[in-house]
Image: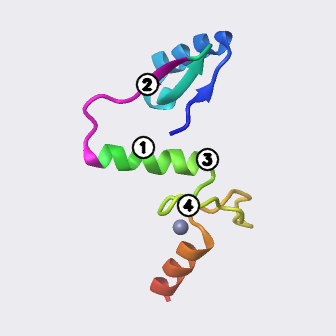
Amino acid sequence: MKPKNLKPNDVDKLFETLKKSGDDAVGSFLIKGHRIQISKHNLTGAERVKLLYRKRRENGLCIVCGTKVTKKNPKSGKLYRLCEHHRGEIDKKAS
Ligand SMILES: [Zn+2]
């Protein structure tokens, strides 16, 4: 994962987030060339997958393969959770 550049003031925000909800603060950050890595200790396999899916969802990526999703669901106005390819596969299974 590419570290995200933070301004010194953002570090306070990051730790506030960490205090409220650890999962939201997970990531890799650079402050003045120093890296802060926040990760969950002793993750189970299922938790790891859940976090990965969540990160992908937040970044607008297909939760299966990580491809950038560009199409929105016309009903909700939100990006689809899956890329065209994987949405197609699920539609095929459903019909
Ligand atoms: Zn996909």
| Secondary structure of residue under mark 1 | helix
Q: Is mark 4 within 8 Å of ligand 1?
A: yes
Residue located beneath label 4 in the image:
62
Mark 2 vs mark 1: give the one in front: 2
The residue under the point 70% across, 60% down is 76
Is 5 or 52 nearer to us in this picture? 5
Question: How far is mark 3 from mark 4, CA to CA?
Answer: 9 Å
Q: Are marks 4 and 1 in contact (CB under 8 Å)?
A: no
Q: Is residue 90 left or right of residue 41?
A: right
The residue under the point 29% across, 28% down is 41
Task: Tell me which corner region of the image, top left, top right, bottom left or bottom right, holds residue 51.
Answer: top left
Task: Tell me which corner region of the image, top left, top right, bottom left or bottom right, holds residue 29.
Answer: top right
Q: Are marks 2 and 1 in contact (CB under 8 Å)?
A: no
In the rendering, at what x and y percent does residue 5 appear?
Answer: 64, 25
Question: How far is mark 2 from mark 1, CA to CA?
Answer: 13 Å
In the rendering, at what x and y percent does residue 11 appear?
Answer: 59, 13
In the rendering, at what x and y percent does residue 34 appear?
Answer: 53, 15
Is 88 or 30 nearer to us in this picture? 30
**Label 2 crowd (10 A; few <14 / some 14-19 / many >=20):** some
**Looking at the image, residue 12 lies above or below residue 76:** above
Q: Is mark 1 within 8 Å of ligand 1?
A: no
**Mark 4 or 2, nearer chain start:** 2
Residue located beneath label 1 in the image:
51
Residue type at numbered disc 1: Leu
